[in-house]
Amino acid sequence: MAAPFLEEPLYSFWKNQGAGEDTAETPGMRVDVEKYRMKYRSYRLGYTPAKGPVEDILKEAEKDSTRSKHKIAGTEDEDKSPIDEPLFHHLSDAKRADIGKYRDDYRKYRLGYASGAKGEVANLFKRTISQSHGGYQEVERICKELSEDDDSDLIRTVSEPAVPTWLPNRLKGLTTQLSGIFADAADESASGSQPIFFTQPQSVLPDPSASYIKVPQMPDGSLQLDAGFLLSNTPLPKAATEFSSIHVIQTAGVSAKIGAAQVKNSAAKLGKQCVVHDWPTIPDNDAKAEYDALYNVASDLILQGANRATLLVFVGAGEPGEMALAVILAMLPFRGIQLAYVTPATEYENPLRTLRSPSGVFEYTATQPERMGRASLAAIFGPLEPCTFKEPLTTWSPLRPEVHPEEQPAPFKIGGLDLPMVTFEGAYSDGVERLANLLVSHYGQDVYPVVSVGETGDALGYGDDLLGAIAAHDCPGFYFPHASGETCKSPEAYGQLELLKAIGAAKQSGKKVVVIAVGGGVNGNATGMIAAMTGSVFVEVPTTLMHYNDATTSAKKAFSLVVNGQILSKNILGTFYLPQLVFCISETFLTLSKSSVHAAVGEACKTMGMLGIANSKTGQEDWHNILGGVEFASDFTKIIETVGGFEKLIRFLQGTRELKAKALALGEELSAMRMERASFGQMATCAKHREKRLAELRRFFHDQLTSEDRAEVIKFLTVINTEIIAAKAMFLAYSDPFEKYRALLFEYAHTLGHGVEAFMNGLYRRATACGLDYSEAFRLHGQCVGMAVLWAGEMSKQQGLLDGDGFLAHQGLLYTFNRFGGYDFAPLRRLCDQLSVSKEEFCEGVLQVVRRDNKRGYCKCAADSSVDQLVRERPGCLLRSSDPDAELRYLVEVTEDSQRRVLERAYDCEFDKVAVLKDGNLQLVSRMEASGQEGDQVKTASALRGLIGSLYKEGSGETEA
Ligand SMILES: NC(=O)c1ccc[n+]([C@@H]2O[C@H](COP(=O)([O-])OP(=O)(O)OC[C@H]3O[C@@H](n4cnc5c(N)ncnc54)[C@H](O)[C@@H]3O)[C@@H](O)[C@H]2O)c1
């Protein structure tokens, strides 16, 4: 079965390897690391805490920190040995009981939040596994070792206590109590007089605050630190009842070491785990050393078992700039842990004012609305009288562009804050000009633009053009081209000396630094981290659909953990930080790859399937528990009616591949010339040639396509973006701005989607090693989600939850967009055959990933079961659980057998179909049958939309709202 339409230039494969999306944690990695931590902690429990005079304390502190470093260095022997078992058997009963209790406590406090609990393998590997240690193979070995651990102890989250009344109720493949009549989750039962769907609060973000607590002093005036005192006086993280452990950062100097040792010893007496980390001595005015220290120590924290409920104690010397570094450090792991900052300073430092690192490059202002009220500094401990700092969030004044005839705004809010998002639909060069004008007029002549762009955006000139346009206003800036792709989403790739120096110099000369991310979601997320660390204005210029409608519609920004090119953990070190403007120039989408468009549509079909017609009366009942949902509720299914524009865009991208390749080649030549410091004239000539190719490509769009076709393409882009942005806003505007509860619904179809994505990425690596071309089989994350939407529908059908027209409507959403085979399994099957991967191996491989899915941590899940989200009856109607923990995320428990069955059928290509309109009837026909037909997908879509509408009316006898 040939699928010649799935060609992709090879360069995009390796660049996109490991692609996934933000809420999608690297499957399995979190669980593996938890096991590693358990071992490591048991190992540490075997040591007697130090007691005795100061010299002993110092010695012990030194020893402890060496031990900690030694562990980081991780000799092969240590890493291989089953650390906990032998030690465990040698312990006394009392000690074993302690460990048992500790384990129970630890389990209680394991991470479970989606935002942040992202895999948790640390930079340890990155920094210690060099080529001389076996490099990549060594990383593989460690990952394998971790993943071979028993994974039967998946635990629930910190915040949501177990419900003792849980009674699994098996129904075909389903093992949950069904609550088709929507039982409210515990947190939403008291909705007051007005239904919460119609309640639009003014503000949902907290004002930051922090307390100063007086610490008892020794007769010589030095601070007397005690773990119990710190634990009981530092506010707990939201929803936790206790701190799970203490991690102490000891700065250089005797008093900090004594302080750290005091905390460690008193923690041991309490039976509380305590790990000490060294803060390096940083040369004066060295931003790069500050950056490296922040990420080295943050990674060390994660590896050595810090979790969301950890208390981070920073024992400082009271030096200027130290508090800023402590706060920025605490903001990184899991997007923020509670910080107790200990300082001997004899004057107050307000932690809510702008804090600057000694180099002046990094800064944190807790009242910045961009940070959405998150203040990672929870308490200050020192010799002064107690007091409380509290400040309101400053007024949110983003760059709100005035109405422009060529601009389409896409309304969006997060945490009650409006985020201006616009698409410029005119000519590319006018769009660049318009953006430059907006930036200079809003931020003034003192603006210092820092344009960050990945390889492809650089080669296509997208970053260069914008910087040039701003410079033309007499506002020069800094150009920061960097490697593209998921494997480069790491602190190392972005923390470049020149970049930090440029930002530092601009700040020193009083400029307004505006960090601008031009490119895909990887660039947006990682560049956002640089903006957040430097407290700069952040502006996003998305050039992929995914970046525009998914990555910018979330405040989550993050780096991944990447070791020797392998992604070990996605988005683990991050923070919340909002851009002040999202400005998209639609003509940049004309150079996208087909996969990228299919991926965006795969995610859109997921949204249509789960939310349906949310602004209908029935929809309002379905989503009655979403605070302020009414503001952004929409008929999300209208996206299908733009299928004509989608098909025309795909054809256009196919027809212009050569032009794009030529432009890219010229762009790459230009980058090389820049590196070799070629003359300005030579570079200008090359840039002109590239511009010519791109102009030709755009002309092709304007001259070769009829105005109707063009309008259809633009409509497709506008509608998919507007609707997906509205869908995100419906949940993030008020209900769940930090994406921990209801908004996790956006994980629909991600369980098996992640499974197949991770498994196929392994096959791509094998194919590369065998020299096989896997271009046809390559699938981006969103395409895997698209396939999994179909599988979710099939599972619902198996379980009698979705049938007849409801099933047809749910499956038809994706099948309408499948004329080009972007969601077919056949090419993946061919690769499996070439690599001799049997059906069993495929299913088992995918299920292994599924077994480590972190959604299991949110609710009960039996050994032979999994958790997932399922639609019942029709699109937009989610199956709901009576377990409040699960219900908060629309999770239900399903059997692994039901997942296996659907995977087996996918492997047999049973689901490679297309929705067509035959004799006036909507039908799902096999790829074979479909290939002979031209078909009119616009009519198909219209019939499908009619069917969905009638399902809504049938269910309620309503007329649409
Ligand atoms: N923060 C969030 O909540 C969130 C949500 C969704 C996705 N994300 C993140 O977004 C990332 C995925 O984003 P993506 O799909 O844009 O991938 P990407 O950023 O890797 O871009 C894909 C490729 O397309 C290239 N490219 C970008 N624009 C182009 C254009 N106009 N023409 C030609 N090539 C172009 C890029 O250089 C890259 O090689 C993931 O890292 C994910 O974690 C984050």
Image (spheres, grey):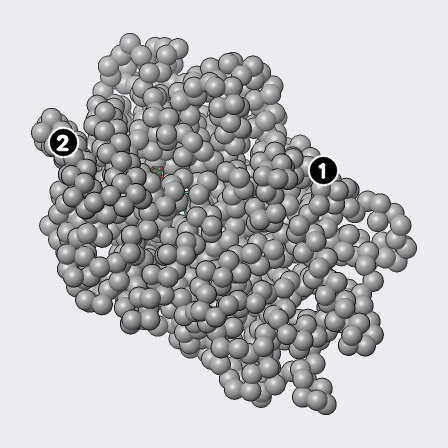
Q: Nearer the viewer, residue 454 or 953?
A: 454
Q: Residue at x 43, y 54 (%)?
A: 495
Q: Quadrant of ligand 1?
A: top left
How far from the left and from the top, in percent, is residue 819? 31, 20
Is residue 129 visible in the rendered image? The answer is yes
Q: Are marks 2 and 1 in contact (CB under 8 Å)?
A: no
Identify the image quadrant of the N terminus.
top left
Residue behind label 1 places its C-beta within 8 angstroms of ligand 1: no
Left or right, 943 with reference to 243: left
- Count of labels in the image: 2
Is residue 756 visible in the rendered image? The answer is no
How far from the left and from the top, in percent, is residue 385? 58, 88
Q: Where on the picture, by quarter, is residue 361?
A: bottom left
How far from the left and from the top, in percent, is residue 380? 56, 77
How far from the left and from the top, in percent, is residue 249? 62, 66
Label 1: few (<14), some or many (≥20) within 10 Å?
few
Label 2: few (<14), some or many (≥20) within 10 Å?
some
Residue bearing mark 1: 150
Q: Residue at x 47, y 35 (%)?
A: 18
Identify the image quadrant of the C terminus.
top left
Left or right, 207 with reference to 311: left
Question: Disc 1 on helix, strand or loop?
Answer: loop
Kind of residue indicated by mark 1: Asp
Q: Which mark is residue 696?
A: 2
Q: Nearer the viewer, residue 835 or 236?
A: 835
Spot the residue most to the bottom. Answer: 219
Q: Residue at x 22, y 59 (%)?
A: 476
Kind of residue indicated by mark 2: Glu
Q: Residue at x 36, y 65 (%)?
A: 504
